């Protein structure tokens, strides 16, 4: 049996062991923070106070008390504090207090995942039992048995659900929920930061529909939101709810000393600047902690990575620890398995867990001492959420971010100040995107007729109602618009996509047990669902066996391969209307409406970690057209000087490769949501240009944010290229040099204005 060592010993060992210390780019020590507390509010019911004291809680953190006070004053709030700071008390306390005063009151809790919903349900039931209050709390989602749904609708005080269920399973059937909507006092929106992009734009419209139905039944609920740290929590909450929101960010929760290490695996191929696998480095690092009895969580980006890391760590289990001390945690596990793992972590029976981002959100697993993040999770908010899983309220903890070879990872690892000094990410939504708006006006008209002069939230809808009448979807009679179509609109609308014509993804792994596992808009399907593509769904790899483009169905089979596919789009992009522009030195920045004609041509098979091209094939699909918004940067011809057409194109391609990874950092989006396209001669200006366009019809505000941040984005891209130690370009900066190509792709991407060597951004 191993000897359990103190975490400070392990950290000291890492600091002096050259095998690891030479790869630590930056070591940040975040000092401990004392708790800031206040007594229970005087109006808090004595039964609630007694229940809290029984649990060892004798006072509230200041952010909990502030939230309670604002809600009691009738304000809508958003509470923004770190992971494990007791955010759930910000809504539980005012909601339960209201129920002690008015047993008829109702609350609706919205969570982005079922695991979170189950977690909160358990806590609420325990509270109610200890207080002896007849509070009925229940989850209402796709897993809720039909025989108890009616009981929940009639008698549930607190309904816990997700936006998808609210959209398709509750609002369209509001006549079955009359008592609930008549007495709805609070709507809780947890993990607010997850509602961004297309999903957030849809959810904002679902909230508009909810408020409309509440008004019909005579209620006006208060909104209580909680969020991880983002740049614009109040703005996002106000966009989602269309109500004035008070920000609560005076975090009073304590924390111990936390060490944050930025770790870059060693280079194994100097010429191509390819680094050792981040997965292997994460395994070696985790063994240092697990082998010494330190409770550790490892985050991996996919299910496959989780299983690989678990396999690697089994040897450690055999040699030192014993069975079931290290567990995996991901989507695909049965709920009972996941609950058992959560309880094992809380009790300390389980020493290590390897998880996808399923454990990033606020599921209660106690506080572990070490967190190893394999690859940058994609946003500062996600990284801090994962890092928050390590750190007891007293005592030391460590977080190690292990970088891969991608430009995004390399940028973050080499710029720790990006992480530690600011939060540049803002969550963007566009509820008035025409395609999304029209979809939800259909749903709203099905739920309740529109009258002349009605608005939908803040949106003007008279023209849309006229259009839907002409299309014979609505019927206009006596000053009202009624739903007249036979179909049920909510069932045909996915909250995860802006496209009306989605490709349905069918899993055919098990013969006779085919099942739909997702859907994707047609434009994205060109590059992600072509035949032979490797499609990742919740971390599992599938190969596309057949894409029936006419029937809009993709048939996929589960596989385990060590490569991913990357399709090349032949893109023709033309500017339809320029809304804004500005000039800086010899560079013009623009923003406006564009038409994108795209045809997928070929795909490559690219090996994980090394980025080697191990095969390719043709794609036979029709051209798709997309109308959306884009930001662009156009360079003066003199920027490229006399270097020649072919070389200038390579420079643009190299710079676009970096921008594809850097830009998403500044608009808080998945790299797939924002496409970056270089053009040697843009159609509207004839100048060398790089376009950033929203992948979704009509756009959701991503490219507009790129336009605002363009100088910063370009400067950071230039820094990343210049700081890369490769000679001529590599996967960590401008992409791998093409065979037979010039050995100057890196230099070309760093072309500067000739006058005095001034960079094209200041």
Image (tube, helix red, strand yellow):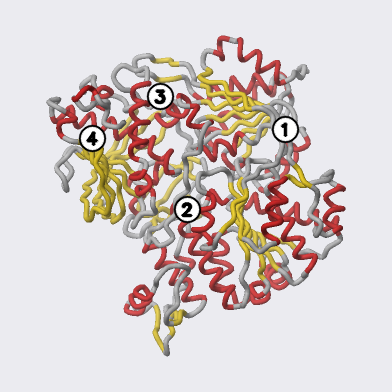
Of marks 4 and 1, the one in the foreground: 4
The front one of 89 and 378 is: 89
Q: CA distance from mark 2 to mark 3?
A: 30 Å
CB under 8 Å between callouts 4 and 1?
A: no
The picture places residue 670, in percent across and down from the top left corner, at 43, 43
| Crowd tier of the residue under label 1, counting other residues whose Cα lies within 10 Å: few below 14, some 14–19, many 20 or above | some
Of marks 1 and 3, the one in the foreground: 1
Write the residue at 37% across / 31% down.
716
Q: CA distance from mark 1 to mark 3?
A: 37 Å
Name which quarter of the figure residue 757 lies in.
Answer: top left
Which badge, 1 or 2, comes first in the chain's sequence?
A: 1
CB under 8 Å between callouts 4 and 2?
A: no
Q: CA distance from mark 3 to mark 4?
A: 38 Å
Name which quarter of the figure residue 669 lies in.
Answer: top left
**What kind of element bears circle 1?**
loop
Which badge, 4 or 2, comes first in the chain's sequence?
A: 2
């Amino acid at each position: 049996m191993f000897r359990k060592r103190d975490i400070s010993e392990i950290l000291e060992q890492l600091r002096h062991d050259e095998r690891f210390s030479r790869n630590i780019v930056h070591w940040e020590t975040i000092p401990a923070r004392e708790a800031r507390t206040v007594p229970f509010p005087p109006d808090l019911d004595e039964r609630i106070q007694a229940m809290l004291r029984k649990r060892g809680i004798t006072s509230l953190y200041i952010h909990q008390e502030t939230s309670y006070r604002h809600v009691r004053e009738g304000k809508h709030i958003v509470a923004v504090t770190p992971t494990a700071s007791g955010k759930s008390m910000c809504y539980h306390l005012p909601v339960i207090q209201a129920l002690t005063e008015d047993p008829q009151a109702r609350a609706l809790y919205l969570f982005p995942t079922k695991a979170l919903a189950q977690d909160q349900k358990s806590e609420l039931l325990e509270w109610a039992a200890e207080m002896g209050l007849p509070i009925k709390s229940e989850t209402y989602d796709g897993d809720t048995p039909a025989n108890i749904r009616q009981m929940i609708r009639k008698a549930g005080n607190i309904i816990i659900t997700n936006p998808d269920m609210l959209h398709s399973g509750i609002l369209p059937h509001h006549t079955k929920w009359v008592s609930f909507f008549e007495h709805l006092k609070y709507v809780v929106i947890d993990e607010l930061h997850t509602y961004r992009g297309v999903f957030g734009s849809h959810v904002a419209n679902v909230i508009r529909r909810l408020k409309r139905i509440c008004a019909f039944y005579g209620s006006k609920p208060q909104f209580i939101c909680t969020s991880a740290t983002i740049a614009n929590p109040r703005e996002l909450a106000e966009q989602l709810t269309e109500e004035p929101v008070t920000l609560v960010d005076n975090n009073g929760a304590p924390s111990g000393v936390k060490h944050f290490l930025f770790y870059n695996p060693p280079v194994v191929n100097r010429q191509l600047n390819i680094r050792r696998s981040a997965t292997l480095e994460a395994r070696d690092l985790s063994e240092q902690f697990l082998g010494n009895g330190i409770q550790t969580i490892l985050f991996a980006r996919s299910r496959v990575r989780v299983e690989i890391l678990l396999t690697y760590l089994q040897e450690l289990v055999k040699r030192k620890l014993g069975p079931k001390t290290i567990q995996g945690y991901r989507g695909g596990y049965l709920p009972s398995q996941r609950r058992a793992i959560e309880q094992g972590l809380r009790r300390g029976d389980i020493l290590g867990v390897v998880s996808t981002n399923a454990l990033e959100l606020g599921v209660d697993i106690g506080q572990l001492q070490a967190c190893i993040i394999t690859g940058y999770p994609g946003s500062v908010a996600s990284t801090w959420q994962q890092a928050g899983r390590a750190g007891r309220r007293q005592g030391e903890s460590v977080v190690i971010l292990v970088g891969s070879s991608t430009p995004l990872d390399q940028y973050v690892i080499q710029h720790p100040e990006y992480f530690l000094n600011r939060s540049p990410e803002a969550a963007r939504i566009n509820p008035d995107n025409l395609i999304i708006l029209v979809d939800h006006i259909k749903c709203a008209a099905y739920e309740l007729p529109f009258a002349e002069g009605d608005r939908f939230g803040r949106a003007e809808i008279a023209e849309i109602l006229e259009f839907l009448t002409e299309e014979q979807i609505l019927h206009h009679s006596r000053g009202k618009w009624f739903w007249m179509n036979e179909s049920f609109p909510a069932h045909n609308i996915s909250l995860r996509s802006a496209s009306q014509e989605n490709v349905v993804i069918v899993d055919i792994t098990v013969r006779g047990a085919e099942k739909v596992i997702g859907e994707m808009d047609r434009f994205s399907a060109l590059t992600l669902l072509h035949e032979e593509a490797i499609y990742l769904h919740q971390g599992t790899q599938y190969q596309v066996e057949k894409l029936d483009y006419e029937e809009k169905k993709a048939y996929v089979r589960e596989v385990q391969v060590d490569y991913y596919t990357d399709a090349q789009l032949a893109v023709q992009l033309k500017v339809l209307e320029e809304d804004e522009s500005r000039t800086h030195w010899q560079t013009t920045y623009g923003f406006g409406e564009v038409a994108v004609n795209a045809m997928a041509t070929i795909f490559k098979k690219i090996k994980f970690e090394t980025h080697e091209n191990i095969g390719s094939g043709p794609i036979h699909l029709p051209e798709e057209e997309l109308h959306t918004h884009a930001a662009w940067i156009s360079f003066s011809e003199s920027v490229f000087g006399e270097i020649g057409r072919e070389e200038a194109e390579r420079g643009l391609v190299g710079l676009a490769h970096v921008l594809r990874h850097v830009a998403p950092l500044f608009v808080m989006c998945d790299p797939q949501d924002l496409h970056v396209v270089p053009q040697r001669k843009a159609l509207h200006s004839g100048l060398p240009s790089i376009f950033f366009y929203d992948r979704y019809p009509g756009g959701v505000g991503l490219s507009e944010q790129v336009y605002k941040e363009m100088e910063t984005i370009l400067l950071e891209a230039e820094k990343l290229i210049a700081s890369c130690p490769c000679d001529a370009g590599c996967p960590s900066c401008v992409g791998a040099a093409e065979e037979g190509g010039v050995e100057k792709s890196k230099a070309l991407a760093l072309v500067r204005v000739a006058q005095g060597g001034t960079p094209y951004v200041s």
